[in-house]
Image: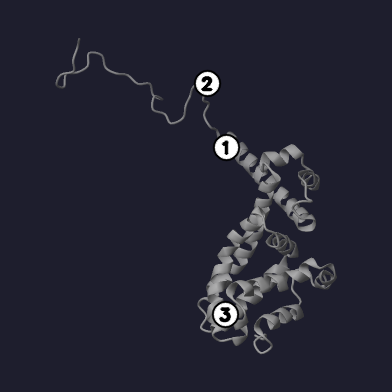
Amino acid sequence: MAHCTGSQPLATPLYFPPNAFSATPTSRNHPPVTNDRRKRGKQSAEAAAHTRQEIITAATECFSSQGYEATTLRGIAQATGLTHGSLRHHFGSKLDIWRAVADTVLEHYQSHMLPILQDATQMENPLQAFKQVVESFIRVSYSDPMLARLLMGETATDNERADYVRANFLSLHTPIGLLFERAREQCPWLNQHTNDTFFLALLSLTFFPLIVPGVQQLLDKQPGKAPQQQVERIMGILFGPVHSGP
């Protein structure tokens, strides 16, 4: 049996073909990834993302107007012009679609409110900062009533979906609570509330006009914008007559 000893040269030099260490396979079973294949893959991913967004948009309207229980996959499919099987391919179940819708609603609030909350924490006047946050929340809610109606419909229930909304909404509730405690030192009217009861009052006063048809007709006169008198009414109830102004 031969043994390797010292640095003796090999009897036969080793030879490697030019593509032996190529990063791109060249066998027939593993064809190289061409630019065309990458392009098709990108287009497929973009098409899938577009389809998912269409489903979310249609489902948001269905859940908002009909509620979760009354909404069916078949109804969402009809609204999007897709098949029942296509919906299941992209999401799996009605609850999965609802979660995607809920995430969209929560992202809508967070994208608008988190910068305002960050600015408020830097303001010298705690009460003024808190009022700015509260008024902004009202206006964001009125900017897309459909999202507000969907959110209110779930917070009024006691189930897995409500727990999901509450858990994810804490990203707003917690910093608002810190501002509330500071503002209460300047506004005795707020002493009738805890952080939780104030937030509940804010949700109720803001969302009630959006789910009652008679009041909704008033809001429709100025689509996408909360009437100033409605904002002042809510601020007056929450902060008292003296503190309802700017």
Q: Nearer the viewer, residue 192 or 218?
A: 192
Q: Which quadrant of the figure has residue 192?
A: bottom right
Name the kind of residue labelled 3 in the image.
Ala
Q: CA distance from mark 1 to mark 3?
A: 50 Å
Residue corresponding to mark 2 = 28
In the image, residue 206 sits, relative to residue 163, either above or below, namely below
Name the spot of residue 214 as percent of width and height, x first: 85, 70
Side of 15 relative to 97 (left or right): left
The quadrant in which the N terminus is found is: top left
Please give the name of the residue rendered at 84% of the width and 67% of the height, measured from the top-left corner. 213
Name the spot of residue 91 as percent of width and height, x first: 67, 43
Task: Between label 1 and label 3, give the one nearer the viewer.
Answer: 3
Please give the name of the residue rendered at 72% of the width and 48% of the height, measured from the top-left corner. 55
Residue corresponding to mark 3 = 129
Name the kind of residue labelled 2 in the image.
Arg
Local SS, label 3 = helix
Please give the name of the residue rendered at 60% of the width and 68% of the height, measured from the top-left corner. 113
Badge 3 local density, few (<14 within 10 Å), some, or many (20+)? many
Side of 213 relative to 13 (left or right): right
Name the spot of residue 64 as percent of width and height, x first: 76, 58
Residue corresponding to mark 1 = 38
